[in-house]
Amino acid sequence: MTIVHDGARLRLSVFTGGPFQENTYLVHCVDSDRCVVVDPGAATPELVEVLTRAGLTPEAIWLTHAHLDHVDGIPALVEAFPVPVLLHPADLPLYRKAPDQARAFGLPFGGALPEPETTLSAEGSLTLGAATFEVRFAPGHAPGHVMFFEPNAGVALVGDVIFQRSIGRTDLPGGDTQTLLASIRQEVLTLPDATVLFPGHGPATTVGEERMGNPFLLPMTGGSSGRTLA
């Protein structure tokens, strides 16, 4: 576990693991002591241990999308904490086929997924204690991909839309490069430059850093890439 943001309203901790090195996030409103889990992946057993030691009970699972590596920790999490799953309805077919996704990668899938109890919608919002997250619809990597943006804290959980100096892959079923680039233009680059982006893989970055240095975005931003892709 690494605490990646510790502000007046929110504390964000990241748990990274598995063959895809996916980032699972614990979002904790310190004032109210309420918390949620975003995209529970392979590192979920460590997350469960931390929650148990801290005496915290998550109230929901928020999913940016339903690719295997972002949902394969759900069975372990709901076994310990039976909480509702929130998902955009356009990603429900992917969610229901998570075991098939695992087989396609030659990986096991450890348990049944509960049916989502609440659906996420574009232009909606989610409240966590004193924090209010905007739900931003950002398809392209997955049909029902969303991001969670908290303007007062200046943080956004962006899943696999954008990474440090890269963008989400679009070669999986339901992916589309032009749709993804349009989502980035409309939903990421319209955020304040200081907004910290917490992606599904790799380190955090900011809108300003990606506006100026992400080689995939240079045609639309006019930035200047100072780094190369790894």
Image: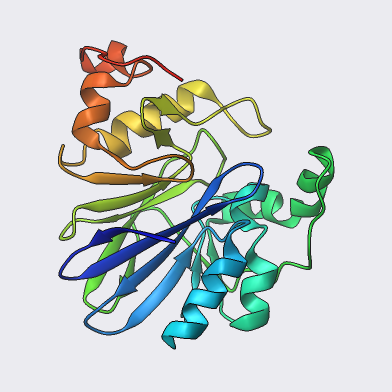
Tell me if residue 115 can be seen. Answer: no
Q: Residue furthest bottom?
A: 55
Q: Quadrant of residue 110?
A: bottom right
- Please provide percent x and percent y for residue 145: 50, 46
| Residue closer to the observer: 93 or 133 | 133
Q: Quadrant of residue 124?
A: bottom left
**Quadrant of the image for the N terminus?**
bottom left
Q: Position of residue 170 (x, y in %)?
A: 57, 27
Q: Residue at x 49, y 31 (%)?
A: 168
Residue 94's place in the image compared with 190, above or below, is below
Q: Can the viewer see residue 188?
A: yes
The image quarter in which residue 142 lies: top right
Report the residue at 55% width, 28% height from top. 169
Tell me: 134 left or right of 60. Answer: left
Which residue is depicted at the point 53% across and 35% down? 141
In this picture, is 86 found above or below 18? Answer: below
Residue 69 appears left or right of 122: right
In this picture the colour scheme is: rainbow
**Which of 223/175 is in front?**
223
The x and y percentages for residue 117 are 59, 74
Please state if 50 lies on the left or on the right of 8 as rendered: right
Q: Residue at x 40, y 34 (%)?
A: 162
Percent position (x, y) of residue 8? 15, 70
Q: Nearer the viewer, residue 228 or 101?
A: 228
